[in-house]
Amino acid sequence: MNTPQQAPELQVAQWFNSPEPITLAALHGKVVVIEAFQMLCPGCVAHGLPQVQKLRRVFPEEHVVVLGLHTVFEHHAAMTPVALEAFLHEYKIRFPVGVDAPAEIGPIPRTMAAYGMRGTPSLLLIDRAGRLREHHFGQVEDMALGAQVALLLGECGDDSATA
Amino acid sequence: MNTPQQAPELQVAQWFNSPEPITLAALHGKVVVIEAFQMLCPGCVAHGLPQVQKLRRVFPEEHVVVLGLHTVFEHHAAMTPVALEAFLHEYKIRFPVGVDAPAEIGPIPRTMAAYGMRGTPSLLLIDRAGRLREHHFGQVEDMALGAQVALLLGECGDDSATA
Amino acid sequence: MNTPQQAPELQVAQWFNSPEPITLAALHGKVVVIEAFQMLCPGCVAHGLPQVQKLRRVFPEEHVVVLGLHTVFEHHAAMTPVALEAFLHEYKIRFPVGVDAPAEIGPIPRTMAAYGMRGTPSLLLIDRAGRLREHHFGQVEDMALGAQVALLLGECGDDSATA
Amino acid sequence: MNTPQQAPELQVAQWFNSPEPITLAALHGKVVVIEAFQMLCPGCVAHGLPQVQKLRRVFPEEHVVVLGLHTVFEHHAAMTPVALEAFLHEYKIRFPVGVDAPAEIGPIPRTMAAYGMRGTPSLLLIDRAGRLREHHFGQVEDMALGAQVALLLGECGDDSATA
């Protein structure tokens, strides 16, 4: 297996459910779970988003941060920030959600491109040292995800593990 | 129980999945099932729409017509026809869907008002003689719905029953 | 499609949830639904039995009779009447359940053989005139089953239809 | 929270799916998950047993041992070892299952009594040092269970933590 790499910083045009912009840099020391989704993606609505809402309930907020990332790469006219805001309200999504910043050229937004995501839903797990440790595309089993997050929680946050 | 009333005609601004406008008048002689929904209504997405997709598979097209009606009464800026078109594509909804015509005043669209719907999802069953026979708000059990549609199918389409 | 045949009479060694033996002959004029199951058949426990419990709730008792038939064709030492009685209690099955009478030779009980059932769960629908109208093996969709029962309910019980 | 206690040894009359008797003592160094169930307990069949079958798939066999324990405390005549063997076959349960040894007096079997279980399903998590760390009665969420097992997996097996 490859050595885990530092997770690229988020590039977000606008945040919902957060009083101020969020950066991965500022979350150093915590485990970060990022659900990359599109509001009109059936698998995101049926599985991905309910799963991270459950994850938000199961793990303590002071150690595990849950973020949504609206990575729109198709139907851009339909999935606007105005539509996303209504969606978050109706689906009772309370954790912070960022709008992935559009690229200058092409339909793939910036953070999605930086992580090389293959589509939605994509789930990223970032460890306390800021390294990308899991990158799932599609459905993940609750039990396996719970185990992966718990393993990252059990690690200490300094970089000694790789020293 | 009240005598069933003639179902008010649909007032639709735009149709998807249909080459031309659809009227209840022209469907006389068939059983018509109308799923009134909003694309950002969680109960519609999780239950109402999958249920009428199943109904479309179970009953023969020549006798049972399934229609969707996008009755937007909130978040109008989010649930535009452009957004609806993307939604229908992503959720593989192939039966005709009409956009309920906006009222001159107020958020409730015209057909929704004419039927006195209480919200979404609402499910209407119209018999072969064009009369409104069932009007459900919220979730209905598959088995009970299958039975109700079958009972209407078994009736003949003339008005003799009420003569 | 073949002309429906008269449903063979039940051959039952013992009844649960019924003060006296039940015969199809005595149920003439009603629609009869028979769920043939084994208490250790996973598909029966997960789908077949809950489905007929739902059917019992949806349709009126005075017109639709729901019966269980314990058609044990394997693991006979495990699925005894004593075990069945505990099973019915734990799973809160309140409708009448008959123990299909063992054959003189071989593992297939008598009613199961008379109907030519292929395994469990099997679902039989018998019309008001006592004729076998549906014979399903395996899982059936709630909506389709609700429609089939409703269609039989709508028929009158004399034999005029076949005269 | 209390200091975790050494888990009482299993008292088993008969094992299925194991060539020889299993003791907790011999499993020292591994995480042990015990699903206490009754074959006629609906919650065990619908939730508890499928959950530990999933757990068996998600975690590696060399570190996590999954055991079933048939803790019959009612309907003893129905839930015999012969019936259990057929049940395990039909439900494709492949991990070792022990029959909790009957008590000399009363309906509660020995291991069930030693752990003070309140009913079925009960789920026990035992750490690498042989201590009882979790004791659930009823349904547990997959995600939380996955996390709990992973946390125990991350611990080392000696007793230094309590020294």
Image: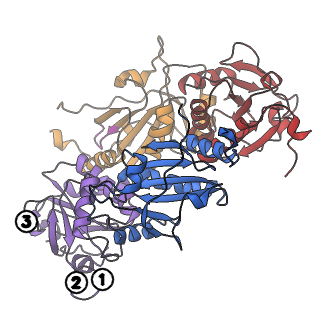
Chain colours: A blue, B purple, C orange, D red
Residue D64 in the image: state x and y as whole percent: 68, 29
Mark toward the viewer: 3 or 1: 1
Q: Quadrant of the N terminus of chain A?
A: top right
Q: Which residue is mark 3?
A: B26
Q: Is residue C100 magenta?
A: no
The disc placed on residue D104 is none
User: Do pointers 3 and 1 mark residues of a single chain?
Assistant: yes
Amino acid type at circle 3 is: Ala
Q: CA distance from mark 3 to mark 1?
A: 29 Å
Give the magenta-colored segment's residue range. Answer: C125-130
- Distance between mark 1 and mark 2 Cα atoms: 7 Å
Q: Chain of mark 1?
A: B
Question: Viewed as shown, does residue C45 lie left or right of C87?
Answer: left
Q: Residue at x 55, y 40 (%)?
A: A4
Q: Is residue A159 left or right of residue C131?
A: right
In which quadrant of the rendered image does the C terminus of chain A lie? Answer: top right
First reached walking from the N terminus: tag 2 or tag 3: 3
Closer-to-camera residue (B88/D140): B88
Between label 2 and label 3, give the one nearer the viewer. 2
Q: Position of residue B42 (x, y in %)?
A: 40, 63
Q: Are marks 1 and 2 in contact (CB under 8 Å)?
A: yes
Q: What residue is rendered at 34% in x and 69% in y?
A: A83
> Horizontal and vertical percent for residue C62?
40, 53
Mark 1 — residue?
B107
Task: Tell me whether marks 2 and 3 sit on the same chain.
Answer: yes
Q: Which residue is mark 2?
A: B103
What amino acid type should be assigned to the residue bearing mark 1? Pro
Number of residues whose C-alpha sits closer than 10 Å to that of mark 3, classed few (under 14), some (14–19) or many (20 or more): few
Q: Say whether mark 2 and mark 1 are on the same chain.
A: yes
Q: Identify the element where label 1 is drawn.
A: loop
